[in-house]
Amino acid sequence: MFAIIYTFEKTTIAIPWCIGALALIAGFILLRRPVDLRFKILPFVIAIVALGIFGPAMLKDKIEITSESFCLRTGFWWSQTVHQFAFKDAHDIQVITRTNSKGRPSKYMRVTLKIGIYDDVPIGDLFHSHESDILKAVTDAIDASG
């Protein structure tokens, strides 16, 4: 029995936390300066977005592959998207490309289940950085499960 867990690298996760911390420091410095109110508020808005939205979201994103199942958790901390399936229920996978509402191509891992339906798992930044390893592990697990 094996378990593979993919998450963002610690240096990547540190980016929004560092930006948020620097924005807070800049905000407190600007509070004491004689500048326009817009420039005093802007660093605090940046800090709230970085520390309250992007930092926690990147901490929660993960892909977990066990010998029995696949699970992708992504999205903001208050509204996560989960794609999960058991390998014994999956028939095969393929990588597809669809255009989104703005006409841009988006890649998906289409998992066809034995009951005839399919799940399109989005290939986002985390998935893309480990795409070949994930696709190989999922294909091997589906083949091993019969």
Image (cartoon, rainbow, N blue to C red):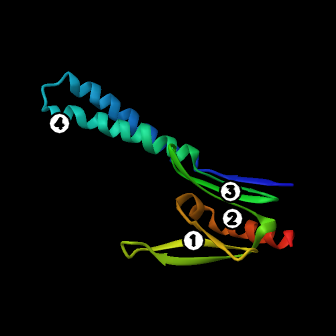
Task: Report x, y in % for residue 37.
Answer: 15, 31
Tag 4 residue: 38
> First in sequence: mark 3 or mark 4?
4
Tag 3 residue: 71
Asked whether 22 or 78 is in front, the reply is 78
**Crowd around label 4: few <14 · some 14–19 · many ≥20 (10 Å):** few
| Disc sitting over residue 134 in the figure | 2
Asked whether 42 or 98 is in front, the reply is 98
Tag 1 residue: 108
Circle 4 SS class:
helix
> First in sequence: mark 4 or mark 1?
4
Task: Report x, y in % for residue 87.
Answer: 78, 65
Circle 1 SS class:
strand
Identify residue type, mark 4: Arg
Task: Report x, y in % for residue 63.
Answer: 65, 55
**Crowd around label 2: few <14 · some 14–19 · many ≥20 (10 Å):** many
Disc 2 to disc 3, C-alpha distance: 11 Å
Identify residue type, mark 3: Cys
